[in-house]
Amino acid sequence: PALSRLLRSLQPAMMAQPVKPVVGIPAQVFPSQRERIEPQDKQVRRSGIPVRDVMRIDHGENSCRTAGTPPRANQKRSYRIQIKNIIGIKDATGDVGRGIALIKDAPADFAVYSGDDMTAAALILMGAQGNVSVTANVATKMMHDLCQAALEGDVVTVHTLNAKLCDLNKQLFIEANPIPVKWALHTLGKIPSGTRLPLTPLSINAQPNVRS
């Protein structure tokens, strides 16, 4: 939004005298979990709507990479005590060890979900409650069956289904998510075509990989 406002402000000057402005694009800064949660909590309290939320950990979020240590569920627990609508956390780092640490420290009524399709079954087998999946958009039943088998501790079925889904899981992240999965869904006739910035269409070179 700030960049859009800057570009709009330059338009009158460019109409009067054509120039080539130089615009610096600021680096992306990831806020800490506290900086994300507290504004949301204020909005929820003002609205009076009983929202329930699941926190999210992704690759590179500074609040979860401090000194290379895994996130501790007791850190999140302190937020949960203050903010009653937080009922769980999605760990999309793909680091099963970090996910296990969260599960170990989590209160009994606090849910831990995987957010990484490649490692979801492993984390569910270790006690996670489910998976927030990208692949399920394309292979819905197979991903459902995989997660159900993991919840039931059926390691044989998990191994079989995981092997079938492994390549698809990989190809759906061949470019930035959700570009590949949107392209796949359009190819399957499930959604209309078209993307909007900051997303771009899936590259021609990547399309055969996703199609396969």
Image (cartoon, rainbow, N blue to C red):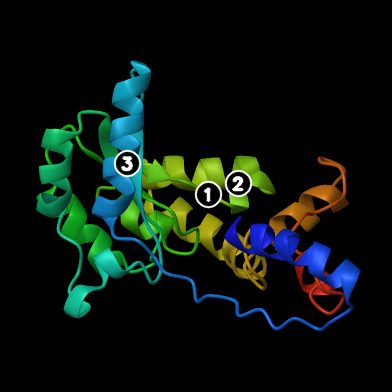
Residue 192 on image: x %, y %: 86, 42
* Amino acid marked by disc 1: Ser
Q: Is residue 28 above or below residue 144?
A: below
Looking at the image, which is closer to me, 110 or 152? 110
Mark 1 secondary-structure assignment: loop
Q: How far from the left and from the top, in percent, is residue 153?
A: 32, 46
| 12 or 136: nearer the viewer | 12
Crowding at dot 1, Cα within 10 Å, few <14 / some 14-19 / many 20+, comes out as: many
Residues at marks 1 and 3, CA–CA distance in whole angstroms: 27 Å
Q: Residue at x 29, y 32 (%)?
A: 42
Residue 191 occupies which quadrant of the picture?
top right
Q: Is residue 126 visible?
A: no
**The N terminus lies in quadrant:** bottom right
- Above-or-below relation of 195 to 65: above
Is the residue under label 3 in contact with that under label 1 (CB below 8 Å)? no
The answer to whether marks 3 and 2 mark residues whose Cβ atoms lie closer than 8 Å is no
Which residue has dot 3 on it?
Answer: 39
Instruction: Give the labeled residue for mark 1.
Output: 133
Could you classify mark 3 by the number of other residues whose Cα lies within 10 Å: few (under 14), some (14-19), or many (20 or more)?
Answer: few
Toward the viewer: 176 or 96? 176
Q: CA distance from mark 1 to mark 2?
A: 5 Å
**Mark 2 element type:** helix
Q: Which mark is residue 136?
A: 2
**Residue at point 13%, 53% (across, down):** 75
Q: Is residue 85 left or right of residue 212?
A: left
